[in-house]
Image: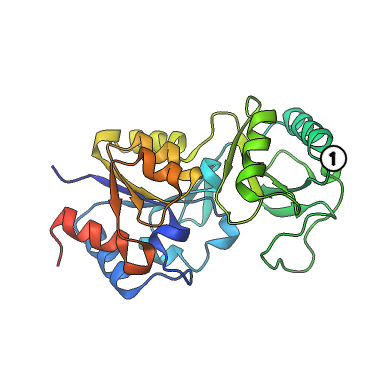
Amino acid sequence: MKPRMVATDLDGTLLDPTGKVTPRTREVIAELDRIGVPVVFVTGRPIRWMEDLWAEVGDHGLAVCSNGGIVYDVADHSVRNALTIDRSIAMQVASTLRKALPGTAFALEKTTGFAREEGFAGRHREPLGIPTGSLEEIFDDSVVKLLALHHETGAETYWHQVEERVGTMVEVTWSSDFPLIEMSARGVTKAATLERLAGELGIGAEDVVAFGDMPNDVPMLAWAGTSYAMANAHPSARRVATHTAPGNDADGVAETLADLFGLT
């Protein structure tokens, strides 16, 4: 039987290496929309990095953003559900990492935008006027993701170091090519939020096909009845996926979906 839902990561997966949706991918998504198969973007991206992509889900679907922290209603351009991080836990995490891994700086993804400490300087250029201050000052009840950055440690090494120290307090994952660690409330993953969303639509894991490429996709790839790691995926993603798809430089998601659904 054909899947009833498609769940796909974006960067390194659905999007090409330049971060764009190719004409072939757009064509396949449109055909799935025509035959009534929902395509859900399941991404680590915050809402603010999604504006150019909403039209690709027909401007009416749902998306899971911030590694499961947010379900976004594309038609209404509004947050349908947000799973936030408790302030006391976030402060405990920050204190633990500052002591164990000096040089760690923090930033926050919120339902309302982005905020950072003075020492946090990521690779993406942020607009002027970003709220900046101590973690205690910028933290509020809209935080869905706590970001930790260290400029003097390897990416994968830092991920394991953070996981070892605070993995029982928050969900720790990594999806970048530099040492930027993403933390959500305990139990909040792409898989957990996708499972709830699919359940609302009467769709079980066995009817979902999922695509991903990085450690933050692992829970989703393990949950879905059929899953594909991209050919250039991180080894952790390839280990849990049931199949391998061509890389995102070869329209791997689109071509795999065309085969699965018998599209031209």
Query: 219 or 197: nearer the eye?
Result: 219
Which residue is located at x 34 percent, y 33 percent? 199
Q: Residue at x 58, y 57 (%)?
A: 177
* Amino acid at the residue labelled 1: Glu
Quarter of the image for residue 204 reads top left
Q: Residue at x 77, y 61 (%)?
A: 130
Q: Residue furthest top?
A: 168
Q: Residue under circle 1?
A: 136
Q: Residue at x 60, y 46 (%)?
A: 156
- Whether residue 84 is visible to the viewer of this picture, yes or no, is no
Q: Position of residue 15 (x, y in %)?
A: 42, 65
Q: Where's residue 101, x and y in %?
A: 78, 39
- Quarter location, residue 264: bottom left
In the rendered image, the vertical position of residue 40 relative to residue 57, given as above or below: above
Picture coordinates of residue 227, whole percent (x, y): 31, 44
Residue 77 in view in this figure: yes
- Compared across the picture, whether 104 is left or right of 1 comes to right
The image shows residue 176, relative to residue 31, as above or below, that is: above
Q: Which quadrant is the N terminus positioned in?
A: top left
Q: How far across and how far down the image is residue 32, in percent?
A: 24, 58
Q: Residue furthest bottom?
A: 23
59 sits to left or right of 108: left
* Viewer-proximal residue among 242 and 194: 242
**Numbered disc 1: secondary structure:** helix
Q: How many marks?
A: 1
Query: What colour scheme governs how the chains and residues are painted in the rendered image of this protein?
Result: rainbow
Q: Is residue 39 left or right of residue 129?
A: left
- The crowding category of the residue bearing disc 1, from other C-alpha atoms within 10 Å (few below 14, some 14 to 19, many at least 20), is few
